[in-house]
Amino acid sequence: MNNTKTYKIGLLSVLAFSGPLYPYAYPKTLFVERVIFPGTLETVPTIRAFYAGRKISGEVSGNSVTFSFPEMRRNFFYLLISHDLEFGSPDNTISCLKLKKSANYKFYALELVSVENKKRKKSLNQPQFDYTWNVKELSLSLAGNRIPDDTVIVWYNPDFIKGLEGGNLIEFPKIIIRPDIVALLGSEEKLHNLSNQYLLSALNLDTIHDNITQEIAYTASPKTILALTT
């Protein structure tokens, strides 16, 4: 049976659940986030991400951009998609990141849960678990627009996002770009121009985040890991 826990962000409470996760003893794992663009694009835009004081450059493969970072094994994360952030800096000291007033954003609580696979249990004669993410979209207004520490930030336009799909033990739910994004904007060139503007607007955040290199490489099959470095 899963245990219920409550996570609080200021006045905001989020229910999450814990189960028999991470059957291995390694202290760290490699988490992966992928942004999936329509397969009809000629080229995929460049996107920046940030996590725990580090900036992450995406690795383009096919119609996707992949971000990866090592982290202690956890079953709960926040994910923010926005390009309208500012520094919270009382007394000239940067204490946090905040959404700008009237900022456009999508903010999610992601919680990894295990579900017993009874069919596999029968064949292997021992408990077998599948892993998936519970996703809950939240508002930051009750927290004064302050972004929780260690939030995974994908610096992009949330209006371009159709939703989140899938995920497993190490891979977050995929961020799916709207399939009609080119028709919505008028051209693929407009999509790239806007994406470049968002990348330039991330320069202020770059100054307070260290670099992090990609930790994995994918083949054309997005589930094949070629190399893992530390």
Image: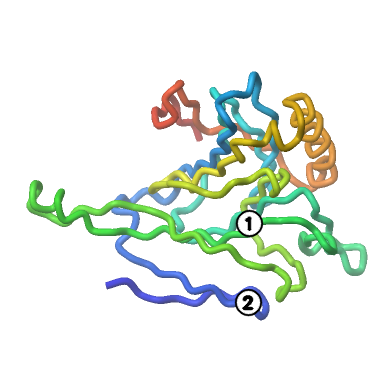
Furthest residue to the top?
Answer: 42
| 178 and 63: which is toward the camera | 178
Residue that mark 2 sits on: 12
Residue 216 image offset from top left, x and y in percent: 50, 31
| 148 and 65: which is toward the camera | 65
| 114 and 217: which is toward the camera | 114
In the image, taking residue 2 as reference, residue 8 lies left or right, namely right
Element under disc 2? strand
Q: Determine crowd level at label 1: few under 14, some 14-19, many 20+ residues with C-alpha closer than 10 A.
A: some
Q: Residue 29 occupies which quadrant of the picture?
A: top left
Does 115 sit above or below residue 211? below
Q: Residue 146 occupies which quadrant of the picture?
A: bottom right
Residue that mark 1 sits on: 151
Identity, as a three-letter code, of the amino acid under mark 1: Thr
Element under disc 1? loop
Q: Residue at x 50, y 26 (%)?
A: 217
Does 90 sit above or below residue 30? below
Identity, as a three-letter code, of the amino acid under mark 2: Leu
Q: Which of the image's four quarters has the N terminus?
A: bottom left
In the image, taking residue 141 as reference, residue 26 lies left or right, namely left
